[in-house]
Image: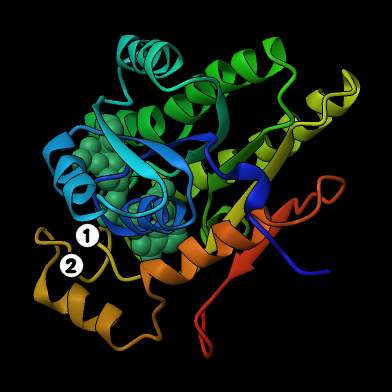
Amino acid sequence: MVLSLDRWVGKVAVVTGASSGIGAAIVEFLVDNGIIVAGLARRSELVEEKAKQLSGKPGKLHAIKADITKEEDILNAFKWIEENLGHVHILINNAGVAKENFLRNGETADWKQTFDVNVMGLCIATREAIKIMSANNINGHIIHINSVVGHKVVPFPGINVYIASKYAVTALTETLRQELNAIDSKIKTTSISPGLVTSEMTILNTEFSEDRKNVLKSMPILKAEDIAEAVGYVLSTAENVQINELTITPVGEKI
Ligand SMILES: NC(=O)c1ccc[n+]([C@@H]2O[C@H](COP(=O)([O-])OP(=O)(O)OC[C@H]3O[C@@H](n4cnc5c(N)ncnc54)[C@H](OP(=O)(O)O)[C@@H]3O)[C@@H](O)[C@H]2O)c1
């Protein structure tokens, strides 16, 4: 079988966290492949800049300013997309935060933000996308950008609540699959779990100490584009094929 994205050409994809890193790479990949993309982020000016760079490509990128911790922003974004771009066929829940702190003395606000972005934002966006897909008989695809730490607690200090939030994403992927199966829905669900990837969450993080960055720099690392290609792969499978989980690590990753 030759994998193809043809059935998604001209269709609408929503990508959360489109302003940097993995989200920005996914957006570019989708637009390169003829898909109409709504890119959500607080820093929508970065998405707008990317949209300009991508003009002339087969698809099109639209920037939407949204704070995924605010339900109203998510609802307004989906309303605008429905009214201006058309029915959502693909949702990529990519927005994420990883605050460096410890359970013994960390900030409650950081923990809440981590869960609000990584878990609650994902739940709300998923619900809104499924409502649209179901109402319009769309066999769409929901993809969660999870993490290897959503499956294994790694001995990397300071990301405790982040790990818990990604375990929640693993559980929510399976819950959603079971829920959709129970109603005979043909909407696909996939968790993509990367290992270490170059982004503002890792070696480009300006808030990290040099020591921490040096530890990260000594480890094998993926490019954001590697994850975008993985998104392309799961989207390109035949309509009867669902990849439930795709774990991608750089060759040689030790954790
Ligand atoms: N980098 C890695 O090693 C790695 C490994 C495994 C999994 N992941 C996952 O990959 C995903 C993308 O992360 P990344 O590595 O690409 O990091 P990144 O460059 O820091 O990107 C995070 C994205 O999330 C968005 N975001 C954060 N808080 C938000 C909020 N309140 N409202 C809306 N958007 C928000 C950011 O946009 P704004 O700041 O503009 O709002 C940004 O676009 C995350 O889910 C992360 O957990 C990353």
Residue 204: % across, % down: 18, 67
* Label 1 CB less than 8 angstroms from ligand 1: yes
Q: Looking at numbered disc 2 in the image, what kind of residue is underneath it?
A: Leu
- Residue 87 lies left or right of residue 245; in this view the side is left
- What is the C-alpha distance between the residues marked 2 and 1? 4 Å
Image height of 239 relative to 128, above or below:
below
Q: Tell me if residue 156 can be seen.
A: no
When the figure is inspected, residue 100 is found, relative to residue 182, above or below; the finding is: below
In terms of secondary structure, where does tag 1 sit?
loop
Which residue occupies the foreground of this view, 118 or 187? 187
Give 175 or 230, whichever is nearer the viewer.
Answer: 230
Q: Which residue is mark 2?
A: 204
Residue 136 appears in the figure: yes
Q: In this view of the protein, which residue sits in the foreground, 147 or 107? A: 147
Task: Identify the residue at image location x=33%, y=28%.
Answer: 112
Badges 2 and 1: C-beta atoms under 8 Å apart? yes
Rendering quarter of residue 213: bottom left
Residue that label 1 marks: 200
Residue 71's place in the image compared with 173, above or below, is: above
In the image, what residue occupies the spot 63% across and 57% down?
A: 151
Q: Position of residue 216 (x, y in %)?
A: 29, 78
Kind of residue indicated by mark 1 = Glu
